Amino acid sequence: GAGVSQSPSNKVTEKGKDVELRCDPISGHTALYWYRQSLGQGLEFLIYFQGNSAPDKSGLPSDRFSAERTGGSVSTLTIQRTQQEDSAVYLCASSLLAGGVTDTQYFGPGTRLTVL
Amino acid sequence: AQSVTQLGSHVSVSEGALVLLRCNYSSSVPPYLFWYVQYPNQGLQLLLKYTSAATLVKGINGFEAEFKKSETSFHLTKPSAHMSDAAEYFCAVSYNAGNMLTFGGGTRLMVKP
């Protein structure tokens, strides 16, 4: 079956612009995660959604970052007023059930964001 | 706070040689541990995971890892490296019901012919 897909694969933007990154999880997966991979910070957790529960936003680096998940499926990560330090690869992952600490997270290929 | 340390950001081995990638975690409670591999321009793929069922865990592509509580380690090994093993490897830990992963800094494995 189809894996996790993300779009766009690459995004170049100018400092101060807003960007939206999209994630389509594996069908039927109730948990969705966003991570960021950057040279300076490595792989960091950003936010996680589980079903209809309120998302865990504890990893978001600033209030310029937000995310939503519509209909329990597709998720959009929005970065407002982008800064150069936001340049990174943004990875999305989904798993069948959160709450199961042994659940495997399946990762998408990522969106490479470059802020000029 | 939980943390994961991977010793050696770059490891180089010859084809056919033993692969050993080191991972240590800090924890006051039993963790769940994972190894992921990332090939160039691709997402992360799970190699194996420790879920407390057995301390020696076998994964895909001939990799295995052993959980050693006394050493707080979860090192990844493979008896004989292949050229196709060249990639970046990440150790990760999860403690909570949300299963958010905390990753180590990664180790880039290079395999020489």
Image (cartoon, coloured by chain):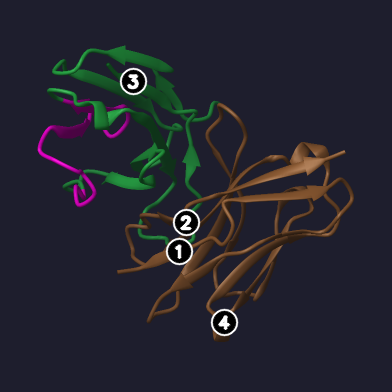
**Residue B88 can be seen, yes or no:** yes
- Give the percent coordinates (x, y) of residue B48: 63, 56
| Structural crowding at the residue carrying mark 4, measured as other residues with C-alpha within 10 Å and reported as few (<14), some (14–19) or many (≥20) | few
Q: Is residue A59 magenta?
A: yes
Q: Mark 4 falls on what kind of element?
A: helix
- Residue at horizontal 24%, vertical 49%? A59
Residue extent of the magenta highlight: A56-79
Query: Which residue occupies the foreground of this view, A54 or A12?
Result: A12
Q: Which residue is mark 2?
A: B104
Q: Which residue is mark 4?
A: B71
For the N terminus of chain A, give its image quadrant.
top right
Q: Which residue is mark 1?
A: B4
**Residue A8 can be seen, yes or no:** no
In the rendered image, which quarter is residue A61 located in?
A: top left
Do circles 3 and 1 both sit on a common chain?
Answer: no
Q: Which chain is brown?
A: B
- Give the percent coordinates (x, y) of residue A53: 19, 48
Rendered position, A38 above or below A43:
above
Circles 1 and 2: CB distance less than 8 Å? yes
Residue type at mark 2 is Gly
